[in-house]
Amino acid sequence: MIDLNGRVAIVTGGGRGIGRAIALQLATLGAKVVVNYMSNVTAAQEVSDEIQRLGSQAVLVQGDVRLSETATLLVKTAGDTFGRLDILVNNAGTTRDMLLSMMSEENWDMVLDTNLKSAYHCSKAVLRPMMRQRYGRIINITSIAGITGNPGQANYSAAKAGMIGLTRSLAKEVGSRQITVNAVAPGFIPTDLTSTLPADLLERAKSMTPLGRLGTVEDVAKVVAFLASDVAAFITGEVIRVDGGMAI
């Protein structure tokens, strides 16, 4: 049984979509959650309210995790509010899809910084408290695009592939301190980021999935909760695909 009572988690990009589902799932299992969000305070407050209805506690931290100052603030808030930090979920992300031949440097940098550099900042910031307590769980939300590539998503695929490299390297660096580092690679999961995609593309994605359906944010959140728990204590450096078999 997965039990996160007494654990404290940071979830970046926790106000909407997959991040919201992760924050709620961790809270359902007993964790207290520091919910980071970029700009939508209404959505973030709804997550906080729901966590409290679930019987747990949450604190909101607005900030851009592309900046090291935000990562430092997240860790300080966890310590000041809840007295410890056990779990980091690097979920914050964005897309700026375009064929590489027409992609601006600005859109390349935006996606690499939001998806990958943020994971660098936040992972580095949590290492000191986790190493001191000789316990920690770092979970990076990557994508099957980082495994298979995707036309029109060279920036996104590069960032997500970078997260896989970060996961495996960091797992080797900190394993001796009983800190595990793993990644979850969702397939096609309908969220705000995909809400504008045409219906025929959604149907094509479904047809490419052996399980015959699109994924849900809850599908991803449950795997994250598993990796965040002591049930997964002997798993590190892994990339678990949650894609219904799309990348087989």
Image (cartoon, rainbow, N blue to C red):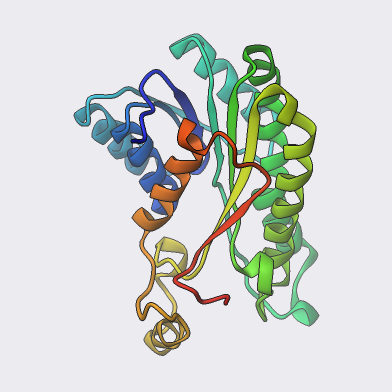
Foreground residue, 96 or 74?
A: 74
| Tally of numbered discs | 0
Foreground residue, 73 or 8?
A: 8
Instruction: Give the quadrant of the N terminus.
Output: top left
Q: Residue at x 69, y 18 (%)?
A: 131
Q: Residue at x 69, y 74 (%)?
A: 149
Residue at the outermost left position: 53
Residue at the outermost front position: 234
Q: Quadrant of residue 56?
A: top left
Q: Pinpoint residue 164: horizontal percent, then vertical percent.
A: 70, 54
Q: Pinpoint residue 218: horizontal percent, then vertical percent.
A: 34, 54
Q: Quadrant of residue 22?
A: top left
Q: Is residue 74 visible from the viewing direction of this image?
A: yes
Foreground residue, 184 or 36?
A: 184
Side of 1 relative to 19 (left or right): left
Q: Is residue 36 visible from the viewing direction of this image?
A: no
Side of 165 relative to 193 (left or right): right
Q: Quadrant of residue 217?
A: bottom left
36 shown above or below 93: above
15 shown above or below 87: below
Q: Pinpoint residue 154: horizontal percent, then vertical percent.
A: 73, 71
Foreground residue, 215 or 238?
A: 238
Instruction: Give the quadrant of the C terminus.
Output: bottom right
Side of 23 relative to 235 (left or right): left
Q: Residue at x 38, y 73 (%)?
A: 214
Side of 51 relative to 62 (left or right): left
Q: Pinpoint residue 29: horizontal percent, then vertical percent.
A: 32, 32
Q: Residue at x 67, y 12 (%)?
A: 132
